[in-house]
Image (tube, rainbow, N blue to C red):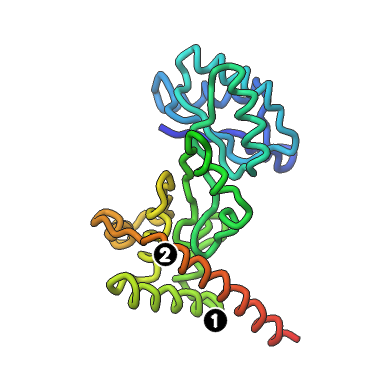
Amino acid sequence: FVCKFGIRLNGGYHVDTSPSWIRSMVDTYLTTFNTDYIDVLMIHNPPSYLNAWDIAATYKELYDEGKVKYFGVSNFFPNDFDRLEEAMQAHDLTLSVLETMFSTSRPQKWNDGTVPNMLNKETPIPVLAWGAVGGDPMNGPNPLFVNPGWKEQQFVNHLTEFGGSNMNGLAADQVMMTWLTSMQNVVAILGTTKADRLVFQTMPTICGEEMSDEEWQSLLQSIQRRVHTLHSVQLHWKL
């Protein structure tokens, strides 16, 4: 049972991590879902000011009361993650998971060090990769597979070619899933609720399909080169 808190829209968008709001949200979840505890409590987005020590103290109280078992964050940068974790360690607690947008079509969190930072800690922090096959729940249908533009279609074609030549004919979205799940401690979050899509996209992982380190690096590097090339082509066309 995973719950998030933080985002508030009254008075304009802001992230509230005050002790009173944390407690209010926890009690609301427990009452609404008629349960005694939350498995994982996550801050939905980093606040403009991270009151790490107040958050950690509140978490300690909730943990001691048995209301929350584990704690995590979503969309945090490494420096904010480390600040909060340092404050929590003073209470003998730790952060257990990071959720972030991460996929072959959006590898920025690999390039900026966010994901490697989590996976290379002494005790690796699991990463929940949302938008695993390129979708964004805030922006409608997945542009890679629903009415793709020229740039999106070129990207899908590249993944399809890679799947055909390196991975026994896997489709583009299956290649994207396999790229993620070939990493230890990375869990792919799929946005679809269609059973046939869920089965299709996860079947290679269920069947044990994995990329070698060489294949994984090769795909990442080819994507980065292709993204740069496509951007240059579009810029030239606009000029």
Dot label at residue 206: none
Amino acid at dot 2:
Glu
Residue 59 location in percent, x, y? 57, 21
Residue 203 location in percent, x, y? 27, 59
Task: Kindly indicate the quadrant of the structure image that contains residue 213.
Answer: bottom left
Q: CA distance from mark 2 to mark 1?
A: 29 Å
| 84 is higher (above) or lower (below) than 210 | above
Amino acid at dot 1:
Trp
Task: Kindly indicate the quadrant of the structure image that contains residue 145.
Answer: bottom left
- For mark 1, give the secondary structure: helix
Q: Is residue 13 left or right of residue 126?
A: right
Residue 175 location in percent, x, y? 38, 66
Residue at image position (57%, 74%) is 225
Residue that sits furthest to the left in the current view: 207
Dot label at residue 214: 2
- For mark 2, give the secondary structure: helix
Tag 1 residue:
150
